Amino acid sequence: MKWNIPNSLTFLRILLIPVFVGIFYLPADAIDPHWVNFFATMVFALAAVTDWFDGYLARALNQTSAFGAFLDPVADKLMVAAALIVLVELERTGAVIALIIIGREIAISALREWMAGIGERSSVAVASLGKIKTAVQMIAILFLLYFDPIGPVDIKFFGELLIYVAAFLTLLSMAYYLKAAWPQMRAKK
């Protein structure tokens, strides 16, 4: 394993998960609920930025590695799963939405692993639809974490709307990847 800046950023993202979750478990009288929302949102935003930045640096500095290719999506999925579980516990989103998003991530990761094993990973490479889904999902999670209105803007409403859009895009992108893999799945019965 080669340790480099992109891998360090990915590892930082993993270390931020207990910090993120822990914010919600501070004693109720320790910090105002608004600031709990604010700090959790900032930690999640930092994790999202490091996700983009580690990929950018890996390409720009020619520091891509097999370990980084493995660890990066694991860190992403762990952070999103942690956020969704917290949001379900806080009753800011439904368990069905969380199951759709987390379930899709597990299924597509397994599909990509299987496709790589048969030499067809490029058939299920990340598509534009998957990138749009991720962007909408991240914005929705940020809004649902923050939850408080900003002036006249009802952040809660937009977060709830976007998480439903993200769930729809999640199902749509899963169908896209399954369709792309279908010929190999049929051939390998």
Image (cartoon, rainbow, N blue to C red):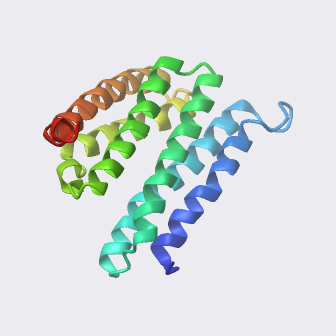
Instruction: Find residue 92 and report its image quarter.
Output: top right
Q: In the rendered image of this protein, does residue 95 appear above or below residue 188?
A: above
Q: Is residue 66 left or right of residue 9?
A: left
Is residue 101 something one can see in this rendering? Answer: yes
Residue 165 in the image: x percent, y percent?
Answer: 32, 25
> What is the residue that sits farthest to the front in this orientation?
189
Q: Name the residue: 27% across, 50% down.
A: 115
Image vertical order of residue 59 relative to residue 159, above or below: below
Q: Position of residue 164 (x, y in %)?
A: 37, 21
Image side of residue 67 versus residue 83, left or right? left
For the point 57% across and 42% down, which residue is it? 41
Residue 106 x %, y % = 43, 39
> Total marks drawn?
0
In this view, the residue in front, 119 or 50, is 119
From where the camera sits, is residue 153 visible?
no
Nearest the eye: 164 or 148:
164
**With 47 as the anchor, is 21 left or right in this view?**
right
Quadrant in which the C terminus is drawn: top left
Q: Could you tell whether 123 is left or right of 101 in the image?
A: left
Asked whether 88 or 27 is in front, the reply is 88
Place of residue 168 in the rendered image (x, y in percent of width and height, measured from the top left): 30, 24
The residue depicted at 48 percent of the width and 45 percent of the height is 77
Q: Say which residue appears at 54% left-offset and 46% top-offset.
A: 79
- Decide which of 170, 176 is in the foreground and name it: 176
- In the displayed structure, 47 sits above or below 8; it is above
Among the 4 quarters of the image, the one containing residue 85: top right
